[in-house]
Image (cartoon, grey):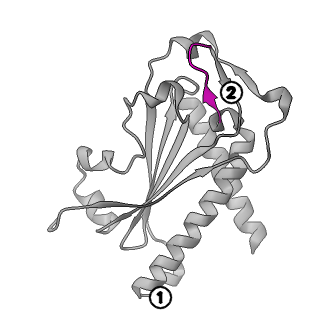
Amino acid sequence: MATETKVQIIERQTIKPSSATPPHLRSFKLSFFDQTAIVIYIPILLYYPNTSSTSKVRTGHHDHVVAINERCQHLIESLSKTLTHFYPLAGRIIEGKAMVECNDAGAEFVKARINCSLSEILEHPDAQMLKQFLPIEYESKEASTGRLLLVQVNCFECGGMTIGLSISHRIADASTLSTFIKCWTTIAFGSRDSDQ
């Protein structure tokens, strides 16, 4: 890459479940395995090139920004709906107790701008650079009592994006993360189809 790749954080917001967690589900006891799990975030990066048919017609920078903003808003809305099904991820671990307070405190959603194309990143992958596409360091102390789910959407100049997810290992494993992503995908595509 000719120029240094820069990640500019544009926005941070808290996404809460679309429906409030009922009172009888407000406490979620951590299993023995969850209690003894390493206090880290499980990270994953998902890559999405710009495959929009409008990219052939729309070539202006403004059009990419509008399309990216629309996609981000759709991701926020579908994440909110998904959190209703995975309500513990919107809660917080109570310090000193083996339980999650399912208080709908929310997940963090970060939107970032990257000053290059996605293809440049994929052609020259750099592990240190890719860490910047995640919303938090995987060894952050926040994993023990802070936000249980963080999402960072990285928007590239070409209209492509990466979605970085970090989920606390205290409450989830790779299987849970995979199930969460599948559910979020289903809701995102389902709500997109119903909007058209």
Q: Is residue 184 left or right of residue 43?
A: right
Residue 159 belongs to magenta span: no
Q: Few, some or many C-alpha atoms within 10 Å of disc 1 (few <14, some 14-19, many ≥20)?
A: few
Give the overall secondary structure of the magenta segment. Answer: loop
Expressed as whole percent of the image width and height from the top left, the position of residue 195 reads 75, 71
In the image, residue 3 above or below residue 122: below
Expressed as whole percent of the image width and height from the top left, the position of residue 6 reads 26, 61
Residue at horizontal 37 percent and vertical 74 percent from the top: 158
Quarter where residue 22 is shown: top right
Front-most of residues 6 and 127: 6
Which amino acid, mark 1? Arg
Quarter where residue 91 is shown: top right
Expressed as whole percent of the image width and height from the top left, the position of residue 161 reads 44, 62
Residue that mark 2 sits on = 101
Q: Find the residue positioned furthest to the front.
A: 95
Region in magenta: 91-97
Front-most of residues 101 and 60: 101
